[in-house]
Structure formats: C-alpha cells, structure tokens
Amino acid sequence: MYRIIEKKELNSSLKSMVIEAPHVARAARPGQFVIVRIHEEGERIPLTIADFDREKGTVTIVFQEVGKSTMHLGTLREGDTIVTFAGPLGQPSEIEDYGKVICIGGGVGIAPIYPIVRALKDKGNYVISIIGVRSKELLFWEDKMRDSSDELIICTDDGSCGRKGVVTEPLKEILDSSNTISRVWAIGPAVMMKYVSALTRPYNIHTIVSLNPIMIDGTGMCGGCRVIIGDESRFVCVDGPEFNAHTVDWDNLLKRLQFYKKEERLAIDHWTHKCKLNND
Ligand code: FAD
Ligand code: FES
Ligand code: MG
C-alpha cells in the first residue's frame, strides 16, 4: 500500500499528490512514469513521475481529472492509500550538455517537462522553457519552472497571462532568430506535440516528445501502447515514452487514443451514479 502524504489542488481539474514510495523514489529518473491502481478492482493508469525526493522516499504525481480513474484518484485524501504504484517504468530521458535547448510543456505536460528542465539545467544547458495553458487559472508550477530555466515564456490561449497564443508561436520566433538551438523537448497533448514536430522538422532540429498512448500493463506484454515509429511498431511503455518526434506516425496515435471513448463514457456515468447512490 502506498500512502498519500500530501495533496494539493493546482486548479479546478488538476491535482498533485506526494506519495510515499521509497523504492520508486530511489530509482526514479526524469522521463519515467508509474502505473497506478487505486484499489484492487481498479484499472491501471500511467502517470509521469513529476518530481521525486530520494531522501524522503517520495514521488510527486500531477494529474488532470479527465475520466473515471483520475476523478476517483482526486477524491482520495492525505493519509489514504493506493494499492499499486509500480515503477519507475520506461526509459529515462537522455540528459547531456547539448548547449542551448528548448523545453515545451502544454497543459498537464508542464509537470512531466519540469524534471527534464531541472536535469538539463543541472547538466549545464542553457534552457529556454515555453509553457502553454488555455488561461491563467490553469497555470501551475510557474515558480518551479522559472527557477530551473534560463528563460521562461508563458502562453495562454486567451491572453490572461503571458503572451496570447499557442506555444508554437514563440518557438518559431526563436528558431527564426537563432541557429544555436541544439534540441527541443515537447510534452503535452498529442496534437500539440504533432504541431511542434511539424514546425521543427524543416529546421532539422532534433525534437523529442513523450508519447501518451493507452497503456495497460506498462511492461511490454499487452501491446496496448503500440505506436508506429518510422516503419516499425514500438511499445511506448518499454521502448519510450520518449521518441524522436520526426519519426512518429501522429495520425495513428491520435486515432488509437479515441478507441475506447464509448467505454470511458460508460465508466464515468456508472461511477458518478454509484457515488450519488452512496451519498444518499
Ligand atoms: P478515461 O475516461 O478512461 O480516459 C480519458 C482519456 O485518457 C482517453 O480517451 C485516453 O486518451 C486516455 N486514457 C484512458 N485510459 C488510459 C490508459 N490506461 N493509459 C493511457 N491513457 C489513457 N495524465 C496526467 O494527468 N498526468 C500525467 O503525469 C500523465 N502521465 C502520463 C504518462 C504516460 C506514459 C502516459 C501514456 C499517459 C499519461 N497521462 C498522464 C495520461 C493518463 O494516463 C490518462 O489521462 C488517464 O489514464 C485517464 O484515465 P481516466 O480513467 O481518468 O479517463
Ligand atoms: Fe502493455 Fe505497453 S502497456 S505493452
Ligand atoms: Mg479510464
């Protein structure tokens, strides 16, 4: 059992939790994730290791409540336990001194990009971070990102904070005005990563994305997380989650993410109905 030792509401649909999981914290590296199961009958969901403290033996997760499992997780309180917290899983990010790099986090993707930004900075890179959200109230970890970056650019769709517009706009401006960017990382909704990838391709800049297909076991056994990279099938849970953006078949990934929409809707309807019955 894994105890929730701290819970914070970052905004109306986004929560962070610090989980007591010494064996995960001990081995965790930027770019890796855990598989979480709330209770014995619960489904397994992947969540990125957003932060870790080896001395305290804790791991931080940040999750957006989008469906049954994340909403259920959001109802748990400090002191409660979760039954499965398996990890660290996946290949860690390759962190070297590349020179000048750009790190992009969109929406909840700000959480997984943070440990990568911090590690790149610690390694000596000059890090320009670009983070984007729909509006100011959805922004989180601005301070953490500012502290770990040499430059931080904030974008909001409605202009309520930072500059108005999407993350690809400042990215294009930087790429047009500088030829010293050696790498770009992008984590966020698949469609955002697809657009970043399309933008950096003509500049021939190595671009890394962290893919988010549906996962079940997280150990390479079920095939659920299969993606097409170049001409090959790869399993994101063991071969990734990071891949060269310019080799990803984005349309295939976007299609597969839609596969279980009907079942996901039924699960949430069933769960909210049960919750209401229990409260009566
Ligand atoms: P559902 O209603 O079941 O699904 C909503 C949508 O979430 C689906 O349409 C699908 O696109 C996606 N999804 C559903 N089930 C899964 C699954 N088993 N695996 C992956 N995606 C699924 N989200 C965060 O908020 N924070 C994170 O740090 C984070 N890290 C991730 C790291 C990896 C490696 C991957 C693959 C995904 C990550 N996600 C993260 C996405 C998160 O796993 C899904 O949002 C979550 O599983 C949704 O579950 P649900 O039951 O609440 O929603
Ligand atoms: Fe089963 Fe990757 S989640 S193979
Ligand atoms: Mg679900």
Image (cartoon, grey):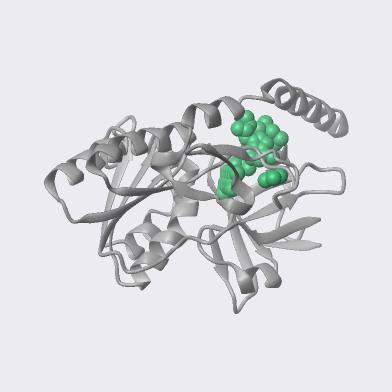
User: In the depicted view, which residue is nearer to us: 109 or 209?
Assistant: 209
Ligand 3 resides in the quarter of the picture at top right
Q: Quadrant of the N terminus?
A: bottom right
Picture quarter containing residue 6? bottom right
User: Residue extending furthest bottom?
Assistant: 55
Is 193 displayed left or right of 16 in the figure? left
Residue 80 image point, x, y percent: 77, 57
Q: Position of residue 215 (x, y in %)?
A: 67, 42
Question: Residue 81, located in which quarter of the rendered image?
Answer: bottom right
Instruction: Give x and y (percent) for residue 53.
Output: 57, 72
Q: Residue at x 67, y 23 (%)?
A: 261
Q: Quadrant of the C terminus?
A: top right
Q: Nearer the viewer, residue 139 or 104?
A: 104
Image point 36% across, 33% down: which residue?
A: 195
Residue 28 visible in image? yes
| Residue 1 falls left or right of residue 115 | right
Left or right of 103: which side holds 279? right
- Disc count in the image? 0
Residue drawn at point x = 44 percent, y = 63 percent: 94
Residue closest to the far front: 231
Expressed as whole percent of the image width and height from the top left, the position of residue 118 reads: 40, 65
Position of residue 51 relative to residue 111, above or below, is: below
Q: Is residue 15 visible?
A: no
